[in-house]
Each structure stands twice: as C-alpha cells, then as structure tokens.
Image: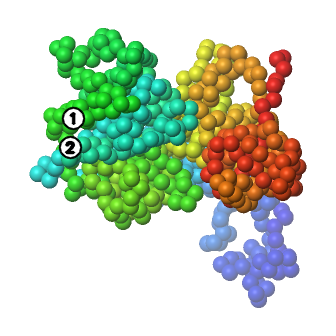
Amino acid sequence: GGGFTKDRMDKDGNQGNKFGGARPGNRNNNAAKKPAAGIDDIPRGKESREKYNKKHEKQLKGSYASRDSRPMRSADHMRPNKHLKSKSGAPVRNEQQAAVVRPTMVQIAESINVQEFAKLIKREVAEVIKSLFLLGEMVTINQDIDFDTATLVGTEFGVDVQPLPPEEDPTEIPEIEDNPEDQVVRPPVVTVMGHVDHGKTSLLDAIRKTHVTAREAGGITQHIGAYTVNAGGKKITFLDTPGHEAFTAMRARGAQCTDISILVVAADDGVMPQTIEAINHSKAAGVPIIVAINKMDKPAANPEHVKQQLSEMELIPEDWGGDTIMVPVSAHSHQGIDDLLEMILLVAEVKELKANPKLPAHGTIVEAKLDKGRGPVATVLVQRGTLTIGDYIIAGTAHGRVRALINDRGEKVRKAGPSTPVEVLGLNEVPQAGDIMDAADEKIARSVAEKRIAKAKAEQQKAAKVSLDDIFSRIKEGELKELNIVVKADVQGSVEALCASLVKIQNEEVKVAVVHSGVGAINESDVMLASAANALIIGFNVRPDANARKLAESEKVDIRPYRVIYDAINDVEAAIKGMLAPKFEEDVIGRVEVRQVITISKMIIAGCYVTEGKVTNNAKIRVVRDGIVISEDEMESLRRFKDDVKEVAAGYECGITLAKFHDIKEGDQFEVYVMKEIAPE
C-alpha cells in the first residue's frame, strides 16, 4: 500500500527512534512492519476512490488490533480540518475577541487619519483599508480620509459617523471668555473703498500727508496697506483696498475686519460699477458707510448729481432726511479732510467700539509675502488682546513664535494692542491673506496647524475628484473646452485677486480653471505642473528663473508675465472670445548680470556681463531682483570701455545706463527685449 517499513523509515527519513525500533507509542511492533496507508496514497478521482475503498474494506470494518490502533477512514473522509468547530457546529471564537463591544455611532472632524478611524470604530486597520480599496480609495495607514469617505466606510461596518459639534472642532483655537469689565475703547478700523481713478489713494495720501500714488504701477494700489493716523488726539486705523473689481476678494476681506467704510466717489464722474460693488460689500458686512465726494476742486464737480445716484442705492444723505453722512472733499487741495476725520470719530463714538487688551491676541492677516532676507512676513491687524514679541501664533496653517513686530512707520515695537496694524516676523510659512491670527500655547497651535493641513488636503482631494469627474464627462460629450492657468504673483493679495478675476472670465464654450496659484518667482515645479495640465502660466510682478525658462522652452509651456493686472485680464478675456490677435510680441534677445554699480557725476552706470544672447542699444530693459520685476525701462546708453556701441554679445562686459530707473544693485538681472511685430495669420 506504499507505507513505510521500519527499515525504510530508518534509511530514508529517520522516522523510527534512534535505536532502530518502531515509533514510540506504537506497542504493536507488527504495525511498524506492515504497510500502512498514508495520506499520499489516497487516490484521486471517483472511480479510483471506489476501488481503494473496496480493496481496504476489511481494514475499514475490522476490529481494533490493539488499544492504540484505529479503524481507517474511507478516502472520502480523509480531509484535513481547516477550522475547529464547537459542538453546535459554530466556529470557536477567542473569548477576548467575542467580548469586543463596537460602537454604533462615532463623531469625527472633517478629516481623520485611517489608523485613528480604525481605532475609533474598533476595527482592524487592514479591514478599513480593504473597505476603502473597494470604494476606489488607495490609502495607507497614515493617510487622511475626508468626512464623506469615513461615512461610507462606517456604513460598511454598521457605524453611524457624525460630525463633531462646532465647539469641539480640532481645527479651531478654543475661545477664551471675555470679561466686559476689562474692555477699553479702541480706535476705529476704517476701510477706504471706491472706483479706480476716483482718488482713493490720493485721499489716503492727503490724510497721511505722504505720496504713495506716484510709486504705484498702472495707477492702482497693488497691495493692501494698513496705516494709523492721529486725528484730534485720537487714533484711526485705515485699511486701503484697491478700487478695481479685480480686487473683489481683497475688498471683501477688508470689509470683514472693519468698523466703518469710506466710499470715495468722484464728484465729476459719479457712481460707477465698482462703487456699487463696494456698497454691496459694506452692506453685506453690516458696516456703516460714510461717503467722501472727492475731486470737489474740479470745474465739472456735481455733488448733487452724486447724491441723487447714491439715493437710488438706498444711501440717502442727511440733508435730504436720510442717515448717510456725505462729506465733500478734495484730496488735491485738502478741502474737507478734517471734516471727514471728525465724522469718522463721531460714528466710532456712537458705535462704542471696545476690546479687551488683556486677552491673548486675535486678529486678521491683511497681507503676507515671502521676503528673501526676513522670511515669511505677515501684516496683521490686531482686533482683540495684545500681541507681544515671544507670543506663539497661528494663522491658517502657518505658525511660529513672534521674533519682531514692525509698525506702519517701519519702527520696531514690543507689543501691539487692539486696532493696531503690525508686520510680524517668525512664522514658518506665508499665511493666506484673510486668515484669522490667534496667539496660543505652542503645543495647541502646532496640533491645530496639523489638523488644518490635513483638512485642507482632504478638501483638495475631494474638490479634485468632483471637478475631474465632471469635467471629463463634459469634455467627452463635447460640451466643454477648458483653459487651465497657473497663477504666480509677488504677494498673496494679488494671487487671490487675479484668481478671482480669471475664474469669472468664461463663456458657454470655454471654462477657466486655475490649476495652481502661489507666491514667488515662477519655478520648475510650476512649469512641470503647467505642462501636465496643458496650462499657460500668468506671472504678476514675477519672472521665471533660468531653469524654469529652459524647461518651459522644451515643454512648450507659454509663460505670460504682466505688471498691470488689467492687461492679464484683458488678454485672457480676448483669448477666450477668440479675438486675441496681438500686433506685437515681446522677443527676449539677451540676459545680463549686474556685477558692479558705478556712479560718475550723478550718473548711475551698471557694469554688466552678458550671460546669454546679446544686448542692443535700441532694446528695452526689464530689471529683475530675486525673481521679482522691479522696473521696466528704456536703455539710455550702451558702452564698451568708453565707446558707445550698437551691440554687445554673450561673454563680454559692458556698461548700461537706464533712462529712468537708477536704484540698480549688484546681482540684479537685466532681461533685454525688443517688441517684434507679428504678421496677422
């Protein structure tokens, strides 16, 4: 029967004992000598089994040869047991496993770690990951899942997943109770709004007695500023929001942290679309409006016409029986400025503006940027409490210890109380403009920041899924063409404003999607993303670095730099409407590095080295510092030694003088370009 004899066992497998006898326990020595049926002898197939059973029938039915012998089982029953069974036939369970009490309901935040979720619902991590895999989610033990995904997994395991109550949201800093007895009067925060060219910045200049307007490119304020002025022995804080509708996002944010809105309307121009928009923002935020009717020194000034237009917008002047204060002013001649400040203080007094300076600081990020020398810099408007050097703060996902506080006059200060704008140094990254800033314990702040990052990632994944599915199906059906754009700018406020404007520019045939936006120079990562998404790159006051430029050429990515926001919006709008037919194109013919700055009889000469291409004396120059455009200018002279030359090739040194811009520094890069006419196709 193919069994092992004693001799075979000793010879082949040492299956006997070491003395050569039968295996211990087998008292019948004959049992070792007779062939015995083994598991390997069980024949396969139905017919073979029947023959086997017949052949061994006697052995199957025979009596026990000894106490230790057992009747053979038939081939049909010779199967190894996979699971132990209880008497009732049910699988035997570990007592500890059977005692696990699983929850029927759990509460989570908007996102949760896979491992944490498994612990919460008392399941093995592998089970949760398997469930997610079946839902089409490829995740690891340390990844986060959003609330909706967790709800689906919970349903699989019979667990009802509920959101955490708002007060238990781990992405928020816990509220601290305010004692009304500690509250003191604080300065009013005033937002200045108005249509472009209605003299909003000039009015602020007149109030501050400075001259900011001349330095602004394109005639509009590019970044939000915050300034404190003294009027009649009292302080007033001004927030400056740009007048163009491109800055809707900035203006909406400005209205959220303000007490009073100054609406600047030109007496000779009247109510314009941006004026109406500013009124709507203020009304939505429940902020009282004071109207400054500007340009009263102009011959065409007609304040009564302005009042008539505003009354149609439910802003009825006091002298017409309404409750809206309207002050005629002139930024040029300073007429009515004191009256305007007096009205601001009057409204502030009526509103009884108070805050508790004893609490931990709480405020809003007005502006944020990455400074090469100082790192992330954020302008904060403190709204409650006092911000002090050494405080640990959190704003959005950014956090860090305050290293320095700089006021609006550029002076270093040790602390900033309610309604005070200050620049803050010490954050680990650039926060988003409009983020809420809180001073908190370092451990709490770090934990909250981590939760916020996880939440943001979950939202990003969720948004990407929804939009990709939707867009893909619509493109397949031929319903949708899409223009993808990557936006880079010098400060966060401009990024937000540009994104908000671009998304609005769309028609039935084409949809605009901003696939990525950020602060700083255009880099290789941006170009790779644009290439993958088939996107064009719009740079506002920033330039691509050398590596990004080369990559863009090889990947055929279109990079369009702008200095004035209108041009970017108009170009994209025209492209979408199929009407973009530029007559001229910028042709970069060379790049130059400034190695020395020489001053000769009040003339600033840049001692340069041509790194690539060439320089011609009729070219235009773009000055780039740390990837950011500082100026665009005409070339006044191009010299080699003391001779004026028409052209200098790569690898040679030369001296360049610019027509208007003189603040040249060593290390600056000059981008040399000419405007080339494009023949219509």
| Three-letter code for the amino acid on which mark 2 is drawn | Gly
Kindly indicate whether the residue at mark 2 contacts the one at mark 1 (C-beta within 8 angstroms). Answer: yes
Q: Is residue 373 something that shows in the picture?
A: yes
| In the depicted structure, whether residue 681 falls above or below residue 135 | above
| In the depicted structure, whether residue 199 falls above or below residue 153 | above
Alpha carbons under labels 1 and 2: distance apart: 8 Å
User: Relative to residue 83, is residue 123 drawn left or right?
Assistant: left
> Would you call the spot at circle 2 few (<14 residues within 10 Å), some (14-19), or many (20 or more)?
few
User: Relative to residue 545, is residue 217 drawn left or right?
Assistant: left
Going 27% across and 43% down the picture, which residue do you hit?
Answer: 236
The residue identified by callout 1 is: 342
| Three-letter code for the amino acid on which mark 1 is drawn | Glu
> Would you call the spot at circle 1 few (<14 residues within 10 Å), some (14-19), or many (20 or more)?
some
* Residue ranking furthest to the front: 601
Q: Is residue 249 something that shows in the picture?
A: no
Going 52% across and 60% down the picture, which residue do you hit?
Answer: 374
**Image quarter (top left, top right, bottom left or bottom right) of the C terminus:** top right
Q: 476 or 369, which is in the foreground?
A: 369
Residue 232, numbered circle: 2
User: Relative to residue 565, is residue 189 drawn left or right?
Assistant: left
**Image quarter (top left, top right, bottom left or bottom right) of the N terminus:** bottom right
- The picture places residue 316, in percent across and down from the top left corner, at 24, 15
* Residue ranking furthest to the bottom: 19
Going 31% across and 27% down the picture, which residue do you hit?
Answer: 329
When asked about the image quadrant of residue 508, the answer is top right
Q: Label 1: state its secondary structure.
A: helix
- The picture places residue 297, in percent across and down from the top left corner, at 36, 23
Q: 550 or 66, which is in the foreground?
A: 550
